[in-house]
Image (spheres, rainbow, N blue to C red):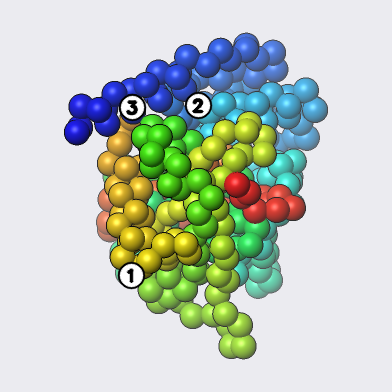
Amino acid sequence: MSFYRDLNENWAIEAWNAEIRESYCTLRVRRLTPTIGAEIEGVDLSRELPEEQLAEIRRAISENLVLVFRDQDISSDDHKRFARYFGKLHSHMLGGAKALSSEKRDPEIFAWRTTRESRFTAGDGWHNDVSCDPKPIWASFLRVLELPETGGGDTAFANLALAYDSLSDPVKSLLDGLTAIHDGAQAWTLGYGAQPEPGTKFPVAEHPVVARHPFTGRKFLFVNPGFTSHIVQLKRQESDAILKMLFEHVASNLAFQTRIQWTPNSLVFWDNWSTWHHAVWDYLPDVRSGQRVSAILDHGPQA
């Protein structure tokens, strides 16, 4: 059985890597792996970007799903300006970062700081960010401001379009047309022990199990272990089995993945719909902190 599975996965990987990619004029793109991720050079995020360069960055994110910009000494305003090129800025329900020299919080900046005393760290497990929202984040832009002194704290990413392509045709036929529930309480209450503000509830949304990307037309899996509770059209036992299979399919297949090592003044931009990510918590007792700005579209993932 594994022989045939491997044939299908290898065919999908070969097809992904065989796609012809045009050269770039305003930036340099160095692929991190054949299947996901690239480092971008020739861009200064401390300034407004010309439309020609933005168009090439949009193409680069569609082709690579994860982009790394090194040596970017930028402010929070620069961070937000770059994200705003790609959609309306998202406000996270769990709160924003305090602005410098002020007690006011910026709801458009999601911040965290993990120390030796932390019970958990944000993102320590495979997930799409905030997939429980009716219009989930499609693009995220992350800076790590404090790096662990002894190293570690990488972020891993997985390609959900390639994960879908590598499934067998009967499984694809089963999944197409199904929808799943994404529950904020599953990730934030059961995972972190967080509670919503009095009088409110964490969001719950229904999304297609297989969605089609509005920019590329590619199909991708849109379920994740952090937020997805069950597939609506299946019995719970069937749903649990299918989700377990899909989660293992993505998490265990290293050919779908890349791992970003953080350096000072790096910014990582990823397509949050068609990738999972996992913040690796391997640096105790060191400290790691950072800020994320994210963009949403006028709609969520659609079949």
238 relative position to 208: left or right: left
Identify the image quadrant of residue 260: top left
In the structure shown, which secondary structural element does the residue marked by tag 3 occupy?
Answer: helix
Give coordinates of residue 39: x percent, y percent: 51, 26
Query: Mark 1 belongs to which amino acid?
Result: Arg
Please, which residue is most extreme toward the bottom here? 199
User: Going from the N terminus, do you reach mark 1 or mark 3 first?
Assistant: 3
Where does label 3 land, which residue?
A: 8
C-alpha separation, residue under disc 1 versus residue under disc 2: 33 Å
Q: Residues within 10 Å of mark 1 (few under 14, many from 20)?
A: few
Quick one: label 2, few (<14), some, or many (20+) residues within 10 Å? many
Q: Earlier in the sequence, mark 1 or mark 2?
A: 2
From the image, state whether disc 1 or disc 3 is nearer to you.
3
Q: Decide if residue 231 is on the left or right side of residue 206.
A: left
Depth order, front residue of 290/156: 156
Left or right of 274? Residue 217 is right
The amino acid sitting under disc 2 is Ala
Quadrant (top left/top right/bottom left/bottom right) for the N terminus:
top left
Q: Which residue is mark 2?
A: 38
Quick check: marks 3 and 2 in contact, CB under 8 Å? no
Q: Nearer the viewer, residue 212 or 19?
A: 212
- Residue 20 x %, y %: 56, 12
Placement of 186 over or under 148, stated as above or below: below
Instruction: State the residue position of label 1.
Output: 119
In the image, what residue occupies the spot 61% across and 82% down? Answer: 200
Tell me the amino acid under the disc marked 3. Asn
Contact, mark 1 vs mark 2 (Cβ under 8 Å)? no
